Image (tube, grey):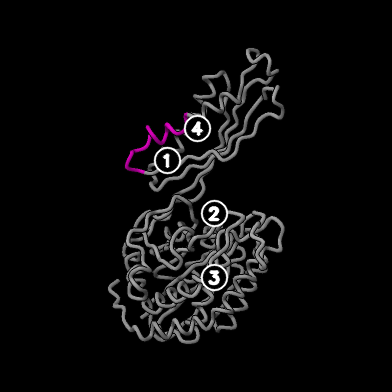
Amino acid sequence: MNIHIDSARHRDDAERTILAYAPELVAIRRDLHQYPELSFHEGRTAKVIARYLLSYGFEVTEGVGGYGVVATLRRGKGDKRLGIRADIDALPIEEATDLPYASHNPRVMHACGHDGHTAILLGAARYLAEQGRFSGTLTLIFQPAEEVGAGAKKMIEDRLFERFPVDAVFGLHNWPGVAAGQFGFVEGPAMASVDQALIRIIGKGGHGASPHETVDPVLASASFITALQSIVARNVDPLEMAVLTVGSIHGGSASNVIPDSVELKLTARAYSPAVRDRLEERVPALAHAQAQSFGAQADVKYRRGFPPVINHIEETRFARRVAEETFPAEQVAGDFRPRTASEDFAYMLQERPGSYLFIGNGDSAPLHSPLYDFNDDIIVPAARYWARLAEVFLS
């Protein structure tokens, strides 16, 4: 992918143009924020997106893999084909920001910035339709159901890349704690796989005053949780990454009653497929062994989620080069580390070459927090970046 990047004057023109769109883009973002929709229920969101894309002059296809929206724009005689993806769904979280544009939908919130990702790509879409200098086919993918790890797969199963062929596909996510508007790139593994286990430790309940007459599943569960990190410490290569997190424990209802069972829910994350397999082997084995050591039993249901995001090296270097030639040096992170969160864009990267990159959201609350708010100041630089990447790729 030896593409030369130049034309500083054109970059300035693009920035001025997209800056002029900023009030509308912020309004779009805040409208989406006020009316968030959960995975598999993004009907209004999809209609809003489709309406804007049609007004820009794109050919729009709705209902791809559920509420997915795909827009295409063909220009010139070039045969290159580029895909850019944004996610559109929200989370089952009660917003606590008290912002004037806070969610109107109870217990539903854009706490991950998908409203911002959508506004960013719409901004790039408008610029590219009105003034974009490229020759080839631009395909914009607005993906539903990312938060539950199903949307990308469903779009692919709906023949996304057969119906809308692309030579490469790119995606972007905002990241709190990184300087606002600073871009980050990771070659190879960029985000972790995520799998889930539902574990039920089954004992024999009884009176808290007579523990010798019971098989205490609470004690067995506590021992299992403590021992769980031995998998990371002793079953995984120290040079590899693994994260095991117990996020839910339920058992009993009174302080003086030992329950019959305790239920635990945990997640397992890794960058390497081999480590992922090792976690799937060791977590159930440890649960059974720990339970048996207390005279209890373990019932384990282990469910695979989605794979790690593994960026293609050539496409990632290209994406970084676009940023370096478009923005000041301080706006491109020199050493951006992989993240241990997960993303179903991984499925798209299994199908086509591409890269998943990051843009700083500044000093905001963390992702998935009821206090999170997307930083509207990063819409313009991110839209400018997508526009430039498209023009260079389709040069």
Task: List the residue tagged with mark 1.
Answer: 277
Residue at the spot x=67%, y=66% of the render?
A: 35
> Residue 164 location, x and y as percent?
49, 71
Task: List the residue tagged with mark 3.
Answer: 376
Name the amino acid type tagged 2: Gly
Name the amino acid type tagged 4: Pro
| Circle 2: element type | loop
Residue at the spot x=38%, y=85% of the render?
A: 10
The nearer-to-camera label among 2 and 3 is 3
Judge by depth and name the residue closer to the eye, 51 or 370.
370
323 relative to 342, above or below: below
Q: Which comes before the other along the chain, label 2 or label 1? A: 2
Residue at the spot x=32%, y=42% of the render?
A: 239
Task: List the residue tagged with mark 2.
Answer: 149
Q: Is residue 251 left or right of residue 130?
A: right
Q: Which comes before the other along the chain, label 2 or label 3? A: 2
**CA separation, marks 1 and 4?**
12 Å
Mark 1 burial class by Cα count in 10 Å: few <14, some 14-19, many 20+:
few
Q: Provide the residue span drawn in magenta.
A: 227-240
| Circle 4: element type | helix
